[in-house]
Image (tube, rainbow, N blue to C red):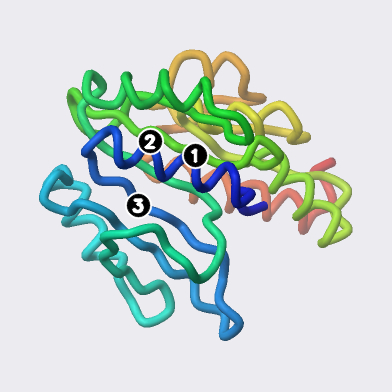
Amino acid sequence: FPLSDKAAAAVWQLMEAFPLAPRLFMEPSPDGLFQTLYLGHKYMDPAAYSYMEVLNSPLNPFAPITSFPTEGKIIAISYFDEPARLKPIYQAALQASGIKAVLYDSTAYENRAYMEIFSDTSGKGTGVLAAKEICGADQVFVFGDNFNDIDMFRVADQSFAPENGEEEMKKMATRVIPSNREGGVISTMAELFRLYQKGEQG
């Protein structure tokens, strides 16, 4: 669910008011490309810029911008920076209409946090329910480790949080699994798949 034109304009005003380096995830183009735009790379955290370069590919191209994108719809905006630098724009985003904002600490980097902005009609929970309906699934299982996963934990039939995830997420989860570094997600998915094949999961 992309941002409305009014919400997108409000978000752009926030970007101009706070000189950080967001990434803009755009609605897929007619040829199926998921383009990501980025603003102000000179302000971008080096780790975030390196990660973005790794993800850059013909199917998911990254492109710099200096002005409001006139083609396509914005699905979400993502920031990665020091928490103290993100809190002012987060507080401002909470006051804007038509959007939701989530701020949460990184579990991999010290003194770094993520902030995500998206339509107030969307979110991971909405996406999970839509996928469940499209697939005709009886149940949906999700994996998450941070506060941006709360929405989908609330709507999922079962939820799994890794040992290195946030304490609140582990409390919400159906089950706590080994950490990401220990391959907890992959091993749990393999276990669930084996149970499904045996008809024991449900």
User: Which one is nearer the viewer's eye here, 114 or 172?
Assistant: 114
Residue 16: x, y in percent? 30, 41
Residue 18: x, y in percent? 27, 33
Residue type for callout 2: Leu
Q: Is residue 100 above or below residue 37?
A: above
Residue type for callout 1: Ala
What's the mark number on residue 23? 3
For image coordinates 21% across by 64% down, the residue present is 53
Pointers 1 and 2 in contact (C-beta within 8 Å): yes
Q: Determine which residue is flagged by label 1.
A: 10
Count of number-bearing discs: 3
Of the numbered discs 3 and 2, the one sitting upstream in the chain is 2
Could one spot residue 181 in this view of the protein? Answer: no
Q: Relative to residue 106, is residue 132 drawn left or right?
A: right
What's the mark number on residue 14? 2
Disc 2 secondary structure class: helix
Of the numbered discs 1 and 3, the one sitting upstream in the chain is 1
Where, by quadrant of the figure, is residue 32 drawn? Answer: bottom right
Residue type for callout 3: Arg
**CA gap, disc 1 and disc 2:** 7 Å
For image coordinates 49% across by 39% down, the residue present is 10
Instruction: Choose mark 1 or mark 3, whichever is in front.
Output: 1
